[in-house]
Image: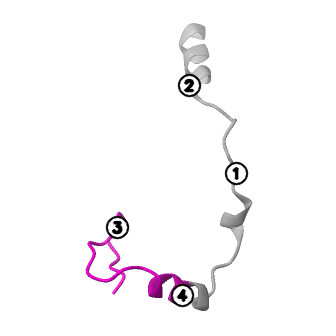
């Protein structure tokens, strides 16, 4: 059992990147500006949201 626990602890890492800018509030102006800058007639991205 101890061997298994040790293996799982090796897989789980507390060392990860933290991007403080992801905590910022997104406002409506930023959303509309980003959508205006995306090209038309393109497939939606991974989120499935088209830019048009």
Numbered label tally? 4
According to the picture, the residue beneath numbered tag 1 turns out to be 18
According to the picture, the residue beneath numbered tag 2 turns out to be 11
- Looking at the rendering, the stretch of residues picked out in magenta corresponds to 31-52
Asked if the residues shown at circle 4 and circle 1 are in contact, with their CB atoms under 8 angstroms apart, the answer is: no
| Picture colour scheme | one colour
User: Distance from label 2 to label 4 (Cα)?
Assistant: 41 Å
Asked if the residues shown at circle 3 and circle 1 are in contact, with their CB atoms under 8 angstroms apart, the answer is: no
User: Distance from label 4 to label 3 (Cα)?
Assistant: 17 Å
According to the picture, the residue beneath numbered tag 4 turns out to be 33
User: Distance from label 3 to label 2 (Cα)?
Assistant: 31 Å
User: Distance from label 3 to label 1 (Cα)?
Assistant: 24 Å
According to the picture, the residue beneath numbered tag 3 turns out to be 45
In the displayed structure, 28 sits above or below 46; it is: below
Closer mark to the observer between disc 4 and disc 3: 4
Residue 48: percent from left, percent from top: 32, 71
Q: Nearer the viewer, residue 8 or 15?
A: 15
Neighbours of disc 2 within 10 Å: few (<14), some (14-19), many (20+)? few
Residue at (33, 87) in percent of width and height: 52
Mark found first going from the N terminus, 3 or 2: 2
25 lies left or right of 44: right
* Quarter of the image with the N terminus in it: top right
Residue 16: percent from left, percent from top: 66, 41
User: Distance from label 1 to label 2 (Cα)?
Assistant: 19 Å
Closer mark to the observer between disc 4 and disc 1: 4
User: Distance from label 4 to label 1 (Cα)?
Assistant: 25 Å
- Tell me which secondary structure the magenta stretch mostly adopts: loop
Residue 42: percent from left, percent from top: 28, 75
Q: Identify the secondary structure beneath mark 4.
A: helix
Neighbours of disc 1 within 10 Å: few (<14), some (14-19), many (20+)? few
């Amino acid at each position: 059992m101890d061997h298994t626990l040790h293996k799982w602890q090796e897989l789980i890492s507390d060392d990860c990147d933290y991007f403080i800018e992801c905590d910022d509030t997104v406002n409506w102006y930023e959303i509309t500006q980003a959508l205006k800058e995306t090209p038309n007639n393109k497939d939606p991205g991974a989120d499935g949201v088209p830019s048009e």
